Amino acid sequence: MASHVEQAVAARLAAVRARRDQQATDRAARAVRRRAGVDARNRAKLRRLAEQDTNHDPDNDDGH
């Protein structure tokens, strides 16, 4: 039979492990959302650049 001190230590260690596991899960979820946001911004930028390229007037001498 474990002493009350050993039980308290085991409970605290379990709480720390659970908190670390939750933090790792939260970090992974944020990374997925961040990657999705970056990808969306990149797609939007490429779409804008493609639109600018198709709207480009080759006869325009000012370079825009």
Image (cartoon, helix red, strand yellow):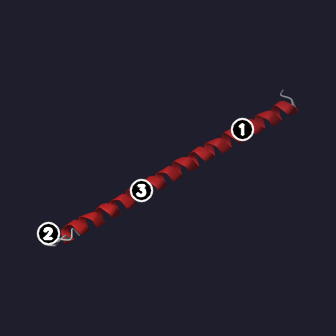
Amino acid found under the numbered disc labelled 3:
Val
Which of marks 1 and 3 precedes in the sequence?
1
Task: Quickly name the residue at label 3.
Answer: 38
The quadrant of the image that shows the N terminus is top right
**Labelled pair 1, 2 in contact (Cβ < 8 Å):** no
The residue at which mark 1 appears reads as 14
Image quarter where the C terminus lies is: bottom left
Q: Nearer the viewer, mark 2 or mark 3?
A: 2
Residue in the picture at 12% in, 72% down: 59
* Relative to 11, residue 38 above or below: below
Q: Which mark is residue 1?
A: none
Q: Residue at x 21, y 66 (%)?
A: 53
Of the numbered discs 1 and 2, the one sitting upstream in the chain is 1
Q: Amino acid at mark 1?
A: Ala
Q: Nearer the viewer, mark 3 or mark 1?
A: 3
Q: Note whether 22 is above or below 10 in the view shown.
A: below
The amino acid on which the numbered mark 2 sits, given as a three-letter code, is: Pro
Q: Position of residue 52 (x, y in %)?
A: 24, 68
16 left or right, relative to 55: right
In three-dimensional space, the C-alpha distance between marks 3 and 1, rounded to whole angstroms, equals 36 Å
Q: Element at badge 1?
A: helix
State the residue in front, 3 or 53.
53
Query: Which residue matches tag 2?
Result: 58
Q: How far, Cα to Cα, is label 1 from label 2? A: 68 Å
Which residue is more in the foreground, 24 or 62?
Answer: 62
In the figure, is residue 59 to the left or right of 37? left
Give 4 or 49, whichever is nearer the viewer: 49
